[in-house]
């Protein structure tokens, strides 16, 4: 027999159970996005390389999957170009398309391309796979889904507020306890301005982040090693030691950044988002949200949050699960000029991205999937032969018309094999239609978990199966 | 301003309205598949080229999108290979991955790779895009979705029966009147056997298909031009002129193919499928299916149906819309050795594929989308400023907790602009919260269609919006 076929490294097959769980995640996020007026779009898997190149830094360009031109892809390529070692240059000649690397750049391209059709502010969500030629490792794949929502065309902080509410609602539905870390790029700019080291802001946040682990002295040493002067380090002390409630931290920072206009603006923004949130208790019934009175426990103003991508310009946030060590499971922020790269400047936007793969891991670890998360068959009719099947078929059709997922085993093989099939597929009920049942116009329904059998009319059977979801 | 960005030819962006409609199509098909015990899987967009090559004929190999190897893709490639004109050979050196061309080959690969985990017979469905480097033209895209379901591991004709029931149910839900053409590859083999022209069977079906348009004499002329002998043409006469009810056609064919064992087997299969279907009236309420008594109007035994793909070995079928000229909108059939190409012989299977793009066109042309097919916002709160927004926020949260899709306009800009936004987005209700409303604890709800305004409490508003879906 030939060798078992395989799939490219870093990619995955998703079987029925994984699909049910993934669909539960996607559908939950989708529903909440819809509740806030976000509408779905989809863009092609392939974009022109001219759209993608240069948008993710030099490293990102290398991680783009490029698609070989169709037909005679060598036509017009000079021998010189083929021989040399400049594979980047040659790749650009061999390929004019690439697979999308994220959903943000295709979204920016979409907004600019369809500008005349869009009602601004435009609220869109998008749930699609992206591809990156990263070295595969645990938890890092070459194909993975992103679940993004963005509003472009408004600089109102109400948008940030809504994204926080969406985070709260999504994770409340999942049953995952989370903390939202919030910061603002303008505050980081204020800090850099104040200490006169604008280009060192990343080093500073990295060092500050280590306070709990290594202590104040070691943090200060690290800042020195990063080349930050003594005067600046002195000015940073209240920031490094920042503690207390969110309100206290903001109050301290107001003083520290007294001389920085941009810093004060950043603090205004964070404060407005927090105040608006705490003034918006949710009135629905059965609503148990951290926002009901305990905003403090949910939101954490955290100066060490910087986020890697350079395009953020205002509020930034990241979500951590409280009960699993896994890093950020959701993140986002405001950017001021995303569509500028495609010739449409001046559109402010703010976005969020749920990390579906990590949320999947968290739900698995905490065993939080609702029981109903399955699309598996609810009842299997055992196949005893032609006459019995003729009897079963209309009953099965009637069950399906009532929304009950129903199978008839296709072959009249040994009972044991059919029962094994039901067990292996996790089908909770098996229906048997032998001589007696047919004579009485009934069905013997067996509960596969308890082994209990009941002789039921088709209507009784429908009611019983419906009540068991 | 820079040139507007664009997307690769043959690909499409899907905006909010298109997405709602496409999701309606996918969800309908998905629900019906689930009712019959099919479970969803997903496979990676990229497969190893060794999995894909040679599975779709020589033409298909050329239409595969190939992905340039990452990193130094020229390493180890001889200068000779680069210079020559054999692009196929070079492509194989430059690329080891390709985009999936259909869902059938990845499914076969999946079954073989996961054989030890699967409960056979395995019923899976899969709804994912596929990519083909075809020349783009009206209605033909380089990226499009397929919606496939297959059962492998059973040769029972009950599987064919269920696929017909699925077709009936899906198109009944869509409200599209259809006819299912059914034939059997074994009957075609029988015909070829009988006239001694096994390799001419495609020419024969093409010629017969023209009977209505060009008449019997012209059909016979065409058969002669195809190089079919006079004796064979004489034998074909009853087949060309075949007419009457399905039962009558089968009876005639029984006589014509009296000497062909395989032909009789094919007729047995078609007859069994039809009889089983007509004996399975569906018992559910409100069930208006062509199967209820009028199988004849739904199923058409059609000898001219051959279907292009060579792997079919038993029943084959195609679905045509009765009220739109558009060709086949769904098709499928039985194959006997799909997994054999990956070293796992002897698994019989039968599959179906709904053509989502054509179904989309049919639903559009016949204007059959249910009104509820939208995920658009149901109510927009006008933004009059900070105080009014603070008043609106908890009401909006309460509406969302009741499942009502609610937006608050983010900026306190001119009323006219906000109303334009509501109109452009097709939002049916606008909520206003000015001085009077706030003083009374109420909301002024405006119906954007009639212009009518009502002063309502938040609870009254919830009830009104809920009743309007």
Image (cartoon, coloured by chain):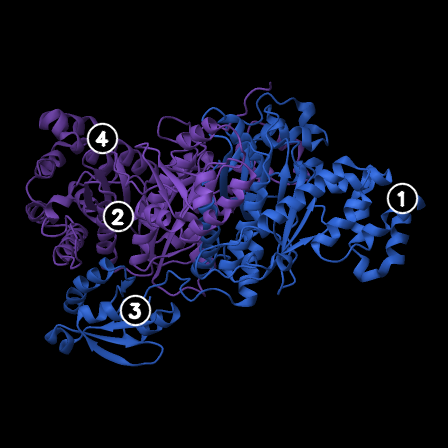
Chain colours: A blue, B purple
Left or right of residue A383: residue B390: right
Looking at the rendered image, the disc whose residue lies closer to the viewer, 2 or 1, is: 1
Residue A383 visible at all:
no
Identify which residue is drawn at 16% across, 55% down: B277
Respond whether the residues carrying marks 2 and 1 are from the same subunit: no
Circles 3 and 2: CB atoms closer than 8 Å: no
In the foreground, A33 or B400: B400
Relative horizontal placement of residue A382, taking residue A189 as reference (left or right): left
Q: Which residue is mark 2?
A: B170
Residue A119: % across, % down: 46, 30
Residues at circles 4 and 3 in contact by the CB criterion of under 8 Å = no
Q: Residues within 10 Å of mark 2 (few under 14, many from 20)?
A: many
Q: CA distance from mark 2 to mark 1?
A: 69 Å
| Residue that carries the numbered disc 1 in the rendered image | A232
Q: Nearer the viewer, residue B165 or B375?
A: B375
Query: Disc 1 sits on a residue from what chain?
Result: A
Q: Residues within 10 Å of mark 4 (few under 14, many from 20)?
A: few
* Chain label for disc 3: A
- Label 2 secondary element: helix
User: Which mark sits nearer the N-terminus, 3 or 1?
Assistant: 1
Task: State the image coordinates of residue B17 (x, y, percent, origin top left).
Answer: 39, 35
Say which element carries label 4: loop
Q: Same chain for marks 4 and 3?
A: no
Give the chain of mark 2.
B
Q: Mark 4 sits on what residue?
A: B325
Cα gap from disc 3 to disc 2, whole angstroms: 25 Å
How far apart in space, not on screen, are marks 1 and 4 (Cα)?
76 Å
Quote the CA–CA distance across marks 4 and 3.
Answer: 44 Å
* Image quarter hosting the C terminus of chain A: bottom left
Disc 2 to disc 4, C-alpha distance: 19 Å
Labels in figure, total: 4
């Amino acid at each position: 027999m030939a060798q078992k076929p395989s799939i490219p490294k870093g990619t995955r097959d998703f079987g029925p159970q994984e699909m049910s769980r993934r669909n539960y995640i996607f559908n939950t996020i989708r529903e909440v996005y819809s509740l806030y007026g976000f509408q779905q779009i989809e863009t092609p898997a392939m974009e022109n390389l001219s759209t993608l190149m240069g948008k993710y830094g030099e490293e990102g360009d290398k991680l783009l999957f490029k698609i070989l031109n169709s037909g005679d892809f060598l036509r017009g390529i000079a021998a010189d170009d083929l021989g040399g070692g400049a594979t980047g240059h040659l790749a650009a000649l061999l390929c004019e398309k690439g697979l999308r690397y994220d959903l943000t750049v295709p979204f920016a391209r979409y907004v600019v391309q369809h500008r005349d059709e869009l009602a601004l502010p435009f609220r869109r969500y998008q749930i699609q796979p992206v591809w990156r030629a990263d070295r595969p490792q645990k938890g890092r794949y070459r194909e993975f889904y992103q679940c993004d929502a963005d509003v472009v065309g408004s600089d109102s902080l109400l948008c940030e507020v809504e994204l926080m509410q969406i985070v709260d609602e999504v994770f409340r539905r999942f049953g995952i306890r989370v903390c939202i870390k919030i910061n603002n790029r303008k505050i980081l700019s204020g800090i850099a301005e104040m200490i006169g080291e604008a280009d060192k802001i990343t080093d500073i946040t990295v060092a500050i982040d280590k306070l709990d682990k290594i202590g104040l002295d070691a943090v200060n040493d690290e800042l020195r090693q990063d080349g930050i002067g003594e005067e600046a380090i002195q000015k940073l002390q209240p920031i490094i030691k920042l503690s207390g409630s969110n309100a206290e931290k903001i109050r301290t920072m107001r003083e520290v950044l007294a001389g920085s206009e941009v810093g004060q603006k950043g603090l205004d923004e964070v404060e407005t988002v927090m105040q608006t949130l705490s003034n918006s208790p949710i009135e629905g019934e059965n609503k148990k949200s951290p926002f009901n009175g305990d905003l403090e426990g949910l939101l954490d103003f955290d100066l060490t949050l910087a986020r890697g991508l350079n395009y953020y310009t205002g509020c930034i946030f990241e979500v951590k699960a409280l009960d699993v060590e896994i890093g950020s499971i959701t993140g986002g922020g405001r950017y001021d000029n995303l569509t500028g790269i495609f010739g449409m400047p001046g559109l402010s936007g703010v976005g969020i991205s749920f990390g579906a793969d990590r949320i999947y891991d968290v739900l698995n670890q905490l065993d939080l999937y609702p029981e109903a998360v399955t699309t598996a068959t609810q009842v299997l009719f055992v196949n005893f032969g032609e006459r019995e099947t003729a009897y079963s078929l209309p009953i099965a059709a009637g069950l399906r018309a009532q929304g009950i997922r129903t199978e008839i085993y296709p072959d009249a093989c040994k009972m044991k094999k059919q029962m094994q099939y039901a067990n292996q597929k996790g089908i909770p009920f098996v229906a048997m239609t032998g001589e007696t049942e047919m004579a009485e116009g009934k069905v013997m329904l067996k509960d596969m978990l308890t082994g209990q059998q009941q002789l039921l009319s088709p209507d009784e059977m429908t009611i019983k199966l419906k009540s068991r979801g």
